Image (cartoon, helix red, strand yellow):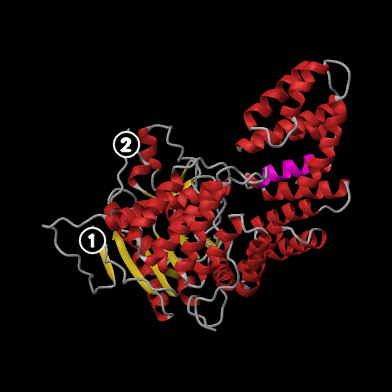
């Protein structure tokens, strides 16, 4: 961004040299158009200049640009977009397109961001800053090859571009090239050892390799640097570096079993104002994991019975969920739940059979499976929380659910067998929020696979009709596409989510002992050498055929490379 600001500064110098209102401009101009001005002062000065109604065209566009810079410092990306859009209307420029594209990037709108960066490159000569920012947007979309190509272009133009080396390393890590990733991130640290961001990204590599002490050391140094000298780059969302540092160190502490330090870091993560989509995703994860590690630290009352791991592979009804075996690095864990014996809504005959079939297939390929059949809310919460806690030290975490599911205001919920809605009762409090599961698993160093054979009909229609029309459910068939976590972030890196049917559609329970989706899934799960997305493609084809096109399974992936559930 620095090179792009130079041209705006030159225009600014000419702008304040105009004769009219010289005294006012001499005071307001530098405050509005100096990138080191505190944001509130910058915005106030720019507001006063706009109110003068003296400038038009390119000069007014410059004022809108600098006010957008102030909003960007505050993390108010909607106002950044509004001001840069007005500046583009008055006088398009590389700097303005770049700033607006960066704001769209920070909001998670990657396609729009890429379009703005493309327009910026069309307006002027090749610019390393814009290539770098477009690379970030490609990386946000999961297109790591295009991201690396843009970082390469930046490094060619700017051989000492610290952040391009860092982000190229992140993209290489996503493609499984850990050695290449480490080399790039080490180069970024050599170029500028005062920057915390490369250390945070090296923390992730140490975590992937299981070197938790190095991960904690790097994250600690990154947090120290971020506190000592907050990033001044106007493209870095305020507080985002500290949030990232705390959550990475917390995850390393948790994987090490140091729950007390993990708890403290999760609390620190949540105490900071989150300005951008990535920070909100980190806080969504921190909120769930804080609850989990707090449970782990809570002492068992003296008169309470000692916890005993039950030998049976499943439990039914309200019985306590068996604790999964302690996870070790590289371990593959699965949580399998089948709910069909509903007491107050329409019962389903097949989920128990579906869950048992899928659990058996997973055990056959080496997964440690925690299995639950016909769980009430308390048991469903317990087994889910046990699984999320153990997943902190797993390499692959898989969740399978069969039963009723529903969307409320765009959020998806899984339904325990004891759910009973009454007029005036809080509907969502009786169910399990899918966003909570997704946030608890969101961690780029682990592969997460979530499979839901739910939304088999709308089980709540009668109760909702009796309770009134304010619950926002009667018009929502099936489940919503999980484009975001509850805090507004995109689907976490390293995650695949699959539904038995397309968003908003209804899945079939089936005529036989299993649903069409689960029958196909259990058959293909154990196919040796079949990559997981290829496996789901086969499942989709079989379901479409067996249901005569009535049901089309759907999936969304941000996996960081190929994943094989059964060995090649």
Q: Quadrant of residue 91?
A: top right
On the image, numbered disc 2 is attached to which residue? 425
Name the residue at 50% across, 51% down.
282
Q: Is residue 394 left or right of residue 31?
A: left
Dominant SS of magenta comes to helix
Q: Position of residue 496 (x, y in %)?
A: 54, 63
Q: Secondary structure at mark 2?
A: loop
For label 1, the crowd category at 10 Å Cα-Cα, with few meaning under 14, some 14 to 19 and many 20 or more, is some
Query: Who is closer to the viewer here, 45 or 502?
Result: 45
Q: Quadrant of the C terminus?
A: bottom right
Q: Quadrant of residue 253?
A: bottom left
Name the residue at 39% across, 56% down.
262
Name the residue at 86% across, 16% down.
20
Q: Secondary structure at mark 1?
A: loop
Q: Position of residue 88 (x, y in %)?
A: 81, 35
For label 2, the crowd category at 10 Å Cα-Cα, with few meaning under 14, some 14 to 19 and many 20 or more, is few
Q: Give how far apart the Cα atoms at labels 1 and 2 are.
A: 26 Å
Eyeballing the image, is 311 above or below 404?
below
Name the residue at 44% across, 80% down.
365
Query: Who is closer to the viewer here, 121 or 453?
Result: 121
The residue mark sitting in front, 1 or 2, is: 1
Q: Quadrant of residue 502?
A: bottom right
Which labelled disc corresponds to residue 320? Answer: 1
Question: Is residue 171 visible to the viewer in this orientation of the structure?
Answer: no
Question: Magenta residues, as a range?
Answer: 96-105
Compare marks 1 and 2 and give the one earlier in the sequence: 1
Query: Who is closer to the viewer here, 466 or 77?
Result: 77
Which labelled disc corresponds to residue 364? Answer: none
Question: Is residue 465 visible to the viewer in this orientation of the structure?
Answer: yes
Q: Is residue 102 magenta?
A: yes
Q: Position of residue 525 (x, y in %)?
A: 48, 75
């Amino acid at each position: 961004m620095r090179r792009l600001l130079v041209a705006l500064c030159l225009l600014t110098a000419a702008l304040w040299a105009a004769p009219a209102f010289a005294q006012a401009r001499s005071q307001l101009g530098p405050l509005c158009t100096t990138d080191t001005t505190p944001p509130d002062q910058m915005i106030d000065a720019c507001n006063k200049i706009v109110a003068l109604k003296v400038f038009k065209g390119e000069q007014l566009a410059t004022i809108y640009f600098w006010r957008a810079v102030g909003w960007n410092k505050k993390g108010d990306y909607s106002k950044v977009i509004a001001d840069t859009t007005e500046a583009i209307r008055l006088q398009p420029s590389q700097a303005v397109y770049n700033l607006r594209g960066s704001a769209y990037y920070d909001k998670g709108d990657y396609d729009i961001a890429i379009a703005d960066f493309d327009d910026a490159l069309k307006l002027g000569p090749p610019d390393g800053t814009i290539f770098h920012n477009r690379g970030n947007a490609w990386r946000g979309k999961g297109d790591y090859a295009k991201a690396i190509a843009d970082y390469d272009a930046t490094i060619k133009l700017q051989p000492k571009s610290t952040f391009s080396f860092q982000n190229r390393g992140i993209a290489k890590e996503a493609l499984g090239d850990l050695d290449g990733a480490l080399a790039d991130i080490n180069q970024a640290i050599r170029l500028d050892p005062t920057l915390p961001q490369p250390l945070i990204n090296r923390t992730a590599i140490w975590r992937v390799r299981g070197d938790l002490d190095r991960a904690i050391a790097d994250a600690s140094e990154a947090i120290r640097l971020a506190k000592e000298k907050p990033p001044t780059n106007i493209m870095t969302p305020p507080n985002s570096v500290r949030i990232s540092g705390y959550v990475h160190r917390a995850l390393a502490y948790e994987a090490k079993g140091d729950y007390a330090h993990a708890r403290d870091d999760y609390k620190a993560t949540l105490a900071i104002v989150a300005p951008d989509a990535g920070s909100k995703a980190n806080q969504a994860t921190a909120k769930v994991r804080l609850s989990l590690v707090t449970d782990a630290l809570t002492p068992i009352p003296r008169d309470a019975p000692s916890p005993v791991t039950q030998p049976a592979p499943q439990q039914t009804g309200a019985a306590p969920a068996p604790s999964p075996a302690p996870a070790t690095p590289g371990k593959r864990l699965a949580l399998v739940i089948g709910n069909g014996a509903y007491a107050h809504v329409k019962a389903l005959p097949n989920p128990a059979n579906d869950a048992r079939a899928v659990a058996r297939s997973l055990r056959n390929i080496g997964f440690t499976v925690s299995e639950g059949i016909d769980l009430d809310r308390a048991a469903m919460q317990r087994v889910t929380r046990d699984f999320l806690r153990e997943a902190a030290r797993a390499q692959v975490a898989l969740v399978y659910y069969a039963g009723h599911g529903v969307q409320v205001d765009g959020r998806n919920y899984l339904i325990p067998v004891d759910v009973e809605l009454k007029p005036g009762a809080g509907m969502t409090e009786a169910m399990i929020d899918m966003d909570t599961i997704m946030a608890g698993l969101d961690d780029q160093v682990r592969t997460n696979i979530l499979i839901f054979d739910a939304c088999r009909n709308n089980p709540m229609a009668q109760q909702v009709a009796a309770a009134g029309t304010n619950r926002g459910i009667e018009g929502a068939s099936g489940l919503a596409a999980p484009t975001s976590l509850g805090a507004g972030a995109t689907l976490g890196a390293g995650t695949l989510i699959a539904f038995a049917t397309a968003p908003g559609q209804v899945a079939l329970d089936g005529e036989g002992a299993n649903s069409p989706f689960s029958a196909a899934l259990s058959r293909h799960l154990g196919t040796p050498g079949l990559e997981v997305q290829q496996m789901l493609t086969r499942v989709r084809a079989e379901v479409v055929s067996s249901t005569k096109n009535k049901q089309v399974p759907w999936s969304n992936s941000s996996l960081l490379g190929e994943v094989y559930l059964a060995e090649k």
